[in-house]
Image: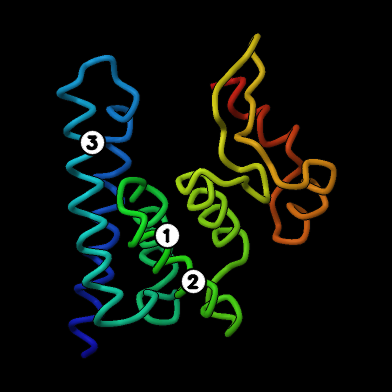
């Protein structure tokens, strides 16, 4: 089992590294590059589904901090696999309740899943686009409380968050 878990940790971090290298393709003008990104994230989403079947949510206690974060990234980018995102969200919620996963990552995954379902996000972590140089979030359920809700899960205020995008 220990060898399996070590191999799993390496596999997850390798998948996240491939994701990171390929993420520039996600918004490419070249349809072939967009397709390559979609295929990569779909393969990773399928594999994450298998991992969740076998291990549940891959927590830091199980696979280490870096691999646990990699699993979250893979779930985050499984945009065309809502079943995978929803399962990851449920398992991550249980892990956060048990103290074995972080509420910050859970908040990002919750928003991403809600946006992919066509619903309003909670924390304003998902950006719809940029207007006049200002990043705009997808619609939020309670925009007046957004910064308060963000603070509860350890996310910086929205204005600080979007300042990062403006500089990019």
Numbered circle sitting on residue 72: 1
Up-down relation of residue 24 to residue 41 (above or below): above
Query: Image check: 15 left or right of 83?
Result: left
Residue lying furthest front:
118
Q: Mark 1 vs mark 2: which is more N-terminal?
A: 1
Secondary structure type for disc 2: helix
Q: Are marks 1 and 2 in contact (CB under 8 Å)?
A: yes
Q: Which residue is mark 3?
A: 37
Query: Image check: 51 left or right of 112?
Result: left
State the separation of the CA atoms marked 3 and 1.
17 Å
Q: Which residue is mark 2?
A: 92
Residue lying furthest bottom:
1
Image position, residue 5 (x, y; %): 25, 80
Residue at x 36%, y 65% (from the top left corner): 67
Up-down relation of residue 10 to residue 117 (above or below): below
* Residue 45 sits in quarter: bottom left
Q: Mark 3 vs mark 1: which is more N-terminal?
A: 3
């Amino acid at each position: 089992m220990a060898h399996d878990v070590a191999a799993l940790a390496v596999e997850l971090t390798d998948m996240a590294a491939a994701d990171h290298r390929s993420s520039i393709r996600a918004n490419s003008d070249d349809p072939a590059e967009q397709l390559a990104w979609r295929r990569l994230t779909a393969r990773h989403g399928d594999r994450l589904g298998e991992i969740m079947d076998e291990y549940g949510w891959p927590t830091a206690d199980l696979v280490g901090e870096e691999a646990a974060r990699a699993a979250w990234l893979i779930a985050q980018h499984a945009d065309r696999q809502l079943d995978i995102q929803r399962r990851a969200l449920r398992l991550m919620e249980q892990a956060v309740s048990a103290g074995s996963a972080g509420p910050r990552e859970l908040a990002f995954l919750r928003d991403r899943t809600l946006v992919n379902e066509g619903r309003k996000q909670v924390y304003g972590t998902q950006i719809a686009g940029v207007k006049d140089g200002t990043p705009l979030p997808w619609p939020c359920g309670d925009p007046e409380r957004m910064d308060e809700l963000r603070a509860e899960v350890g996310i910086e205020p929205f204005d600080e968050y979007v300042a990062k995008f403006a500089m990019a």
